[in-house]
Image: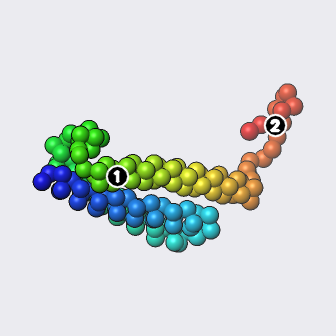
Amino acid sequence: MILTELKNVLVDELKALKDLLSCLEKQQEFIVANDAFKLDGIVSDIQEKTSIVAKFETVRRRLLNNQDIKKVVDESEDDEIKKIYEEITLITKKLVFQKETNDMLIKQSLIFVNKMLSYLSPNKEAKSYNAYGKMRR
């Protein structure tokens, strides 16, 4: 009976993870397109999907009494649970990769924006030389 409940929770968690991955892929599209308004809108969707995943994770942990999921799945005779667990681990790896990609793209965009701002509004200090002929900063 616990395996049936576990299977249902894992199926729900897998669906939630797929939804989260879809949101992160949309976020990447918006980052590449420099669409700040859509990017701002997708953030709330990502937070919502993340909280749903966390809810299923909490239910799963409570169901297993904080046992290691891998151990429970390995000891299980149910091939469907094993298949669902493998899908979850695969999706989780994709999520980590997508999040790191999005973080890197955002960081690159910020570096570019800061460079452009520094070129457009250069340092306003008067440039002068010190006694050694070097520029003061």
Q: Amino acid at mark 1?
A: Lys
- SS for tag 2? loop
- Camera-nearest residue between 95 and 137: 95
Residue in view at x 71 percent, y 57 percent? 116
- SS for tag 1? helix
Q: Amino acid at mark 2?
A: Met
Where residue 30 appears, as percent x and y from the top left, is 56, 67
Residue in view at x 28 percent, y 61 percent? 12
Marks 1 and 2, how far apart at CA: 66 Å
- Camera-nearest residue between 67 and 96: 67
Category of crowding for the residue at label 1, using alpha-carbon neighbours closer than 10 angstroms: few (below 14), some (14–19), many (at least 20): few
Residue in view at x 57 percent, y 55 percent? 106
* First in residue order: circle 1 vs circle 2: 1
- Indicate the quadrant where residue 32 lies: bottom right
Q: Which mark is residue 135?
A: 2
Report whether 122 appears left or right of 77: right
Q: Which mark is residue 83?
A: 1
Figure quadrant of the C terminus: top right
- Tell which residue pokes out farthest to the right in this image: 133
Residue in view at x 55 percent, y 62 percent? 28
- Camera-nearest residue between 18 and 39: 18
Where residue 26 appears, as percent x and y from the top left, is 51, 67
* Residue 69 visible to an observer of this rendering: no
- Indicate the quadrant where residue 72 lies: top left
Figure quadrant of the N terminus: bottom left
Where residue 120 appears, as percent x and y from the top left, is 74, 59
Report whether 30 appears left or right of 74: right
Image: 40 above or below 108: below
* Residue 38 visible to an observer of this rendering: yes
